[in-house]
């Protein structure tokens, strides 16, 4: 019987590890501020900024199941 050790995963830099969470956080903040700022184009920016976390979550769940 052979016992195999799992291969160690590659280490990621902090920048690479936190890049997407920072982008999502900034988009959410921009969306929230835009929603409070006014009407017109600010509403579009708010919808896009606040929809990004939902889209990323759905994509991640779909990719995880595949």
Image (cartoon, rainbow, N blue to C red):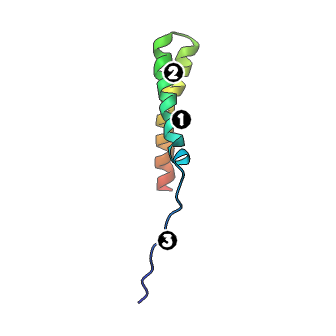
Residue at 45%, 13% in the rendered image: 36
Residue at the spot of label 2 = 46
Q: State the residue in front, 62 or 41.
A: 41
Say whether marks 2 and 3 touch (CB < 8 Å): no
Mark nearest the camera among 2 and 3 is 3
Residue highlighted by disc 1: 23
The percent coordinates of residue 61 (x first, y second) are 46, 48
In the rendered image, which residue does mark 3 sit on? 7
Which of discs 1 and 2 lies nearer the camera? The answer is 1
Task: Give the CA distance from mark 1 to mark 3.
Answer: 30 Å
Tell me the CA gap for discs 1 and 2.
15 Å
Q: Which mark is residue 38?
A: none
What's the distance in space between the residues labelled 2 and 3, CA to CA? 44 Å
Q: Earlier in the sequence, mark 1 or mark 2?
A: 1
Of labels 2 and 3, earlier in sequence is 3
Above or below, 50 relative to 16: above
Element on which disc 1 rests: helix
51 versus 4 height, above or below? above
Name the one closer to the observer, 55 or 49: 49
Percent across and percent down for residue 27 are 52, 29
């Amino acid at each position: 019987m052979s016992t195999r050790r799992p291969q160690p995963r590659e280490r990621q830099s902090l920048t690479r590890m936190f890049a997407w969470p920072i982008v999502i956080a900034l988009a959410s903040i921009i969306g929230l501020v835009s929603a409070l700022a006014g009407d017109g184009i600010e509403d579009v920016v708010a919808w896009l900024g606040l929809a990004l976390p939902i889209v990323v979550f759905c994509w991640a769940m779909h990719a995880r199941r595949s």
